[in-house]
Image: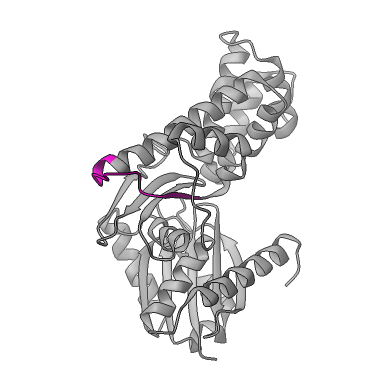
Amino acid sequence: MAGVLAIDGGGTKTILATASRDGVIDTWLEGPGINPVDNPDWLASFEAQIQAAGAAARTCDHAVLALPAYGEIAAVTQSQNQAAASALGQSHAILNDVEAAHVAAFAGGPGVLILAGTGSMAWARDEHGNSLRVGGWGDAFGDEGSAFWIGREAIARLSRALDGRLVAPALVEALFAFLGLDRADPPQALLQWHVELSHPRSQIAALSVLVDRLAEAGEEVAVAILAEAAEHLARHVEAAWRRMKATQCLPWSHAGGVFASKRVMTQLTARLGCPPLPPHLPPIGGALLRAAQDLDWPVDQAWIERLRASIIEHASRARNGRT
């Protein structure tokens, strides 16, 4: 089967897809995150996903892998290069996952992409092809505004509320119910929950959905957390604008689960003073588009629209448990 293969590897979820020359998805697989920075089992997950793709992976003409942390840490990048060379016998290229999301959002054109998923980073490209990144420093001292950051802020403020340093009864009630914690000894329950996390980064990031729900219901602490998240993300974009020395604001777009929050999107748009450009493609589409371009396929706007519709269809099927 001739075609292109792409992988969009995130901290929480990985997507493998193949597409034919007409821009239609043939294969769609989802698996666990493959970020080497926080997942010691990333290689096994990566290899398992390639194996699960079977003939689709072995017979494609070219592959583009969008991998987290690629190009950021020399040892990690080397291990990713080795893994790709071992698992893929055919022609392939590797991009940082945020660069691929930028390609998807702007269909290869200029702009600033702010990604806020498990982590956060901005990737900017000007009309001359010059690129730079802002953020992406990881959860130890960065990732501001990300789902992980939002979740971490929620449990940090929960701990203050349990101490009496913060009055937030609705937050305490909601988090304890969401996490199923024993109320007999709240501090012990919270500490035990954290110690027993199997993948802390993604499990803490998952709390961002609850924070958004609480903010929509008017819970003050949640409202404040999301306002701070939007401010952090705005600073990423503004830093990219400054560093690009843009005489006028480069268009900006977005990717990542945090932007499912209408509150974050509304506040970020107001803070930046101009609306975002809707992404041309979801992030996996950036790797597929780059693969098609590498093969000199006749890619035009109609091709991109077919690819977008096909990605949306397969993603919906995956969410609903259908193949």
Residue 87 in sight: no
Residue 179, percent across and down?
70, 33
Q: Is residue 204 above or below residue 53?
A: above
User: Vertically, is 109 above or below 20?
Assistant: above
Is residue 256 on the magenta stretch?
no
Of 83 and 18, nearer the camera is 18
* Residue 5 pos. (x, y %): 49, 77
Foreground of the two, 95 or 159: 95
Q: Is residue 207 left or right of residue 247?
A: right
Q: Quadrant of the N terminus?
A: bottom right
Q: Quadrant of the C terminus?
A: bottom right
Image quadrant where residue 258 sits: top right
Q: Nearer the viewer, residue 162 or 22?
A: 22
Q: Is residue 205 above or below residue 191?
A: below
Magenta segment range?
242-254
Residue visible at 69% across and 18% down in the picture: 185
For residue 216, which quarter of the picture? top right
Q: Is residue 315 above or below residue 171?
A: below
Left or right, 80 with reference to 224: left
Residue at the image point whose x is 55% and y is 52% from the top: 12
